Amino acid sequence: MRTTIDNLFMLCRAHLYGTDRPDGGNYEDEIDFETLKKMIQENSLSAFLYKPLKEYNDQKKTIQDEVMSDYGSYIQAVMFRELSKNYGIKKLCTEAESRGIRLVFFKGIILADLYPQYAERTSADSDILVSEEQKEAAEQLLIESGYEKNLEHSKIHVQVYYNEKLSHTVELHTRLWEDYTGPRIDILDKMKLSCPETDIRITACGIEVNTLGHEKHLVYQLFHIIKHFSLEGIGIRYLIDTTLFVNRYFKDIDFNLFWKHIEMLGYTKFVEAFFKICIDELKMNDKVFENHTITLDHSVEDLKTDLLNCCLAD
């Protein structure tokens, strides 16, 4: 019998792959909706999982119609807010280009673009990187665009702005790793994950933006994941983000270089186990391990339990 976490992964696969889901495609066991609902909320998956959950309920009829109707109305409002944020980003990009300000986007819309519908990936803010030289001009642009600075949450290398009309928060970075320092940050600095020579131009959520090269963005994602894992724990959405990113850009990523960078950072064991969970639960391309010698052991299940600790909590 599936656990609630198994059912959560099943719903994720159902939405990502439809009839091609690896577990056979049938909802054999009843879902504990109250426990599942808490997990979905804690993992910021409410919009992403509405469609497969409705499909499940159409078959099993275990969730009251009124509950599903309220859920649907809530999701409409959530996704509308995401569309409003996207509108704000588009305006910022257009105005920045007209002023010659170079904005580099990471996480956020870069990852949302990978989802079946980009508004399904809800986010608290938009992360934008700007050079120290253009920081003042970028801040002025935000102010003129209706954003107000949040002095309490701003740091030396991250300025936080909020647009109340759009319910949109922007974190304006002059460093990818905020104000963190230490040996690993020194290594990341030497990798030059973002610079005009290696940054690329892509269309994300219908907007043409600058972003990190694919291999460099994946390295950054793993740094960000490990940071959150160490400080506050992470949930399933980080697994989904990584799976979708690797599957979309697999041919564009130099995995020999990627594993070299991960080894330099001392992240190899963690990333091996993290990738294995993505492969087993979400069908990530298993060729990430080609030309890379790994030793997988009980640490995979241990990590899975730790990663999803927030889901398991009472």
Image (tube, rainbow, N blue to C red):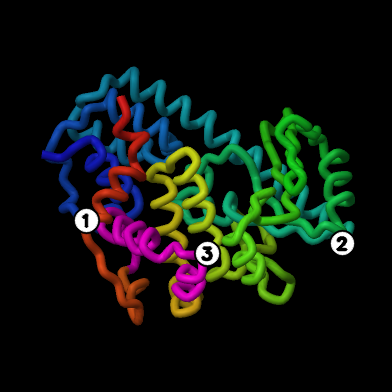
Residue 281 in magenta stretch: yes
| Residue for badge 3 | 219
The kind of secondary structure element at disc 3 is helix
Please name the amino acid that badge 2 sits on. Answer: Gly
Q: Nearer the viewer, mark 1 or mark 3?
A: 1
The chief SS type of the magenta part is: helix
Please tell me which residue is depicted at 34% across the width and 18% down the height of the picture: 66
Please name the amino acid that badge 1 sits on. Answer: His
| Residue for badge 2 | 100
Q: Distance between the residues labelled 1 and 2?
A: 52 Å
- Identify whether 252 is placed above or below 50: below
Mark number, residue 75: none
The kind of secondary structure element at disc 1 is loop
Q: In this view, does 193 lie to the left or right of 102?
A: left
Part of the protein shown in magenta: 258-285
Look at the image and tell me in which quarter the C terminus lies: top left
Mark number, residue 298: 1
Residue 1 spot, x, y in % from top left: 10, 39
- Identify whether 305 is placed above or below 284: above
Decide if residue 200 is in sight here. Answer: no
The image quadrant that residue 163 belongs to is: top right
